[in-house]
Amino acid sequence: MSLARTIANARKAGLSKFWRDLQYIGDAKAGTLVGIDRNGNKYYEDLNEIPGRHRWVDFAQHDFAVSQIEPAWNGWLHHNKQDPPNVDPVTIASHPTWEADPTESATGTRGSFRTYSTTVSPKIQSWNPKVASRS
């Protein structure tokens, strides 16, 4: 990241967005807003950037995770689709009614899946022989 590029992007984006980008993505970025998803994440594109770094996301939440990106937007970020999902007619038309809305991964949280523990209260007990009296 060159100093001239950083200053130019700071002028384009403004001081508050420049500071936010430095805190969250560690780089000064300025681009056109392409769209906003259901979670409030903002997606940007700047074709003057280095290829592979010209599309990025600004997460709505402070404690963000990659699983907060919707699958259609993830495909656009990784160049599987040329058009963003809010413009692409195929993506707009191919939303089945039975498909559930995407949810954030709960891995590492209290809501994560845990298998049933069979060691807490065993169903099978070991055999303890007892000597019976002969009387």
Image: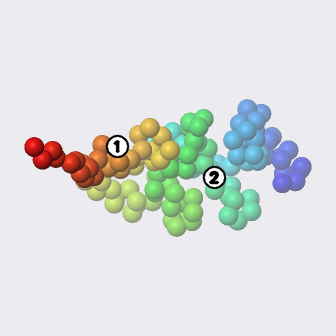
Q: Is residue 97 visible?
A: no
Residue at position x 83%, y 47% from top? 6
How many numbered dots are placed on residues in this image?
Answer: 2
Which residue matches tag 2?
56
Q: Is residue 44 visible?
A: yes
* Mark-to-mark CA distance, 1 and 2: 47 Å
Height in image: 7 above or below 16? below
| 130 displayed left or right of 78 | left
Q: Which dot, 1 or 2, sits closer to the camera?
A: 1
Q: Quadrant of the N terminus?
A: bottom right
Which residue matches tag 1?
120
**Between 98 and 95, the one nearer to me in the picture:** 98
How dense is the environment of label 1, judged by Cα within 10 Å: few (below 14), some, or many (20 and up)?
few
Residue type marked 1? Val
Q: Quadrant of the C terminus?
A: top left
Are the residues flagged by discs 1 and 2 in contact, CB closer than 8 Å? no
Circle 2: element type? strand
Q: Position of residue 71 (x, y in %)?
A: 45, 56
Residue at position x 74%, y 62% from top? 50
